[in-house]
Amino acid sequence: MCLKHHKRWKKHGDPLGGRGKRANGSILAALQAAAVADTDDCILLTAPDGGRAQVTLDGVRMFASRAVWITANGDPGDQHVLHTCNGGSGAHGCISIRHLRLGGSAENMQDKVDAGRQIWGEKHHKHILTEGEVREVRRRYKPRDPINGGRALAAEFGVDPSTISCVVRGKTWTQTSAGPR
């Protein structure tokens, strides 16, 4: 046995195990079954990491729930396929056609926020300021002040003046305990 297969054998008890692969055609069969489901129970199809499964349908990569909608009803165009189960999140991988509906972008984003899948503040990978710094900027800010004005605070905290403006006006950092001014 090569090293790769030996490691799989030690970890999974099978030199071919642990790959998370499904049998050929099993995903397509699951999508087709979910598209004609007559039960009110969730039909789960999860990714190997436990998240929502993605599939390739007609050469396009998409979430499995959208593929089920297309299989059952045709392409929804620009509309989003939303979930009615699990608080509207679909985070647990439900693909039952009875739990799917169409909605707009704003409704999809609100579902994301309601389900707790929206990342805010310091948890966001592009954050520059910390929550404490946001509080400090909001506390100290005085328009056109040479010490506590937007340009001065931007230089002090190492950000663009537009960042300070957005923080002060409540355009960013709205969902944190730092709250708007």
Image (tube, rainbow, N blue to C red):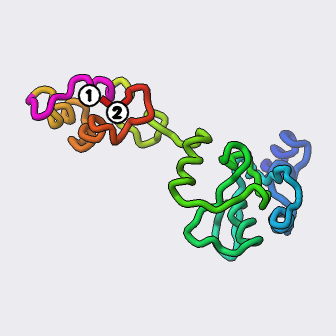
Q: In the figure, residue 181 lies in which quadrant?
A: top left
Q: Give yes or no for residue 145 being in the magenta stretch.
A: yes
Q: On the image, which quarter does residue 100 sit in?
A: bottom right
Across and down, in percent, residue 66 comes to 68, 64
Magenta segment, which residues?
Answer: 133-146
Residue lying at 10% horizontally and 34% vertically, measured from the top left: 144
Nearer to the camera, 97 or 30 = 97
Residue 129's disc is 2
* Mark earlier in primary sequence (2, 1): 2
Estimate the spatial distance between the alpha carbons at disc 2 and disc 1, rounded to whole Å. Answer: 10 Å
Decide whether residue 17 is among the magenta residues: no
Mark 2 Cα-neighbour bin, 10 Å: few <14, some 14–19, many ≥20: some
**For residue 142, what is the image quadrant?**
top left
Residue type highlighted by circle 2: Leu
Q: Is residue 117 left or right of residue 54?
A: left
Q: Which residue is mark 1?
A: 137
Mark closer to the observer (2, 1): 1
Q: Foreground: 181 or 161? A: 181
Q: Is residue 110 left or right of residue 49?
A: left
Which element is circle 2 on?
loop
Q: Residues within 10 Å of mark 1 (few under 14, many from 20)?
A: many
Residue at 69% x, 68% y is 56
Tell me, for residue 110, which label it has, or none: none
Side of 36 relative to 59 (left or right): right
Q: Is residue 30 left or right of residue 165?
A: right
Q: Are marks 2 and 1 in contact (CB under 8 Å)?
A: yes
Can residue 24 be seen at all in this image of the molecule?
no
Rendering coords of residue 28 (x, y %): 82, 68
